[in-house]
Image: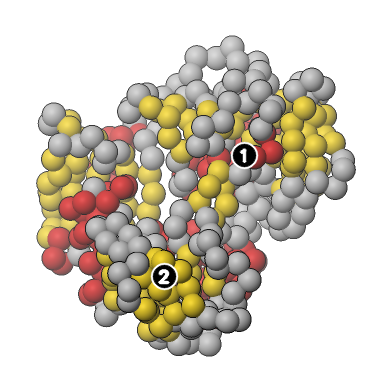
Amino acid sequence: MRTVAVVGASLAGLSAARALRKQGYDGRLVLVGDEPHRPYDRPPLSKEFLAGHIGEADLALEADGEDLGAEWLLGVRATGLDRADRSVRLADGRTVRADGIVVATGAAARILPGSEGLAGVHTLRTLDDARALRDELALGGRLVVIGGGFIGAEVASTAYALGLDVTVIEAAPTPLAGPLGATMGGVVSALHADHGVRLLCGVGVKGLSGKRRVDAVLLEDGRSVPADTVVVGVGARPCVEWLEGSGVALDNGVTCGADGRTTLAGVVAVGDCANWYDPHTGSHRRVEHWTGALERPAAAVATLLAHGATEPGVPRPPYFWSDQYGVKIQFVGHAAGADSVTVEEGATDERSFLAVYRRAGTPVAVLGMNQPRLFTRWRKQFTA
């Protein structure tokens, strides 16, 4: 291969570029990013950066003196992929022809219909999002977070520590039931009540009120929750529209094998936009976690450089962590399909425990709250 284009310049794209060089690729390397920023770390955006404890320089992912010998095309998004001449079309009219392509375009935050143009309403996905939200939170007042997932919970935790009056609204009966199961999702979400943050579950959002600036969140049951600032944390959609008609199969992202290969030769996908096949579950799934973006590109790059002539390995089970209200939450594995979950150490009411999920007696997932050492020992069993 003479030219490889990595489309997406966040952690997954940077990890792919590093893997290319590490695995011996010495040809032309082009990185395309729709944001104007060099690669930066996203997990702190909802925590340390939002709280003002760290600055933008602390988010940098590139090491001092690191030189990948790459061409960086930043601040421009990809608009199409031409399979005939293997070129990536860019919004500014340029094209990048490449022998190999790594799709790492990530995902974009979903927005609440009708919220466009209303001041005080935020999503949190990018550095620019975090800058704007940080400025708003510095004013204090009443924050309403729509969505009780991990991002929403972390924002609520950060805002609580900053002294804001915080309410979290979750449409599902139990927050985090998807990734953690209903029982443990309820235990983790109880952290909100522990700290005086209101949690309203099982009710949807009808809309927002306010003329130029939001002043309340309107619920489907008729209630109105006053708000000075609103954060919408209702998930993300994979950024793959630019691949429509390219021959790359799309279904909740880019449909991939267990090593990132797509339906188009010479194209692999990594990161939040990649719907990888998972042999553990026998299904495809997108893994929107930091460790997936860090680790999986190496396998995808190996497949790309070998022109697909490699045997797909088994991806490591998903691992993620969250910091909320001073509590370290860690999870590895798949909660879906577990037929039991037992607390092996500590106690849930003390918010310090380790729980093991099992299916037919076999551990399939582990959850730890403030049990980092014990959790690390268990995690090694899943990644060996």
Colour scheme used in the picture? secondary structure
Amino acid type, callout 1 = Val
Crowd rating for badge 1 (residues with CA inside 10 Å; few <14, some 14–19, many 20+):
many
| Vertical placement of residue 139 versus 187, above or below | below
Query: Which residue does the image show at 61% across and 81% down from the upper left?
Result: 212
> Disc 2 residue type?
Val
- Residue 75, percent from left and from top: 77, 54
Given residues 262 and 1, the one toward you in this image is 262
Mark number displayed over residue 155: none
Query: Quadrant location of residue 216?
Result: bottom left
- Percent position (x, y) of residue 127? 62, 63
State which quarter of the image contains the C terminus.
top left
Taking the image as drawn, is residue 154 in sight? no
Residue at 49 percent across and 58 percent down: it is: 43
Residue behind mark 2: 145
Q: Is residue 164 left or right of residue 361?
A: right
Residue shown at 61% from the left, 44% from the top: 239
Which one is nearer the viewer's eye here, 148 or 192?
A: 148
Place of residue 42 in the rendered image (x, y in percent of width and height, measured from the top left): 54, 57
Residue at image coords 67%, 44%: 8
Secondary structure category for the residue under label 1: loop
The residue indicated by pointer 1 is 240
Q: Of helix, strand and loop, which one carries label 2?
A: strand
Residue 64 shows in this picture: yes
Q: Give the quadrant of residue 121.
A: bottom right
Q: Earlier in the sequence, mark 1 or mark 2?
A: 2
Q: Position of residue 25 (x, y in %)?
A: 72, 27
Vertical relation: 249 (above or below) 139: above
Q: How many marks?
A: 2
CA distance for labels 1 and 2: 27 Å
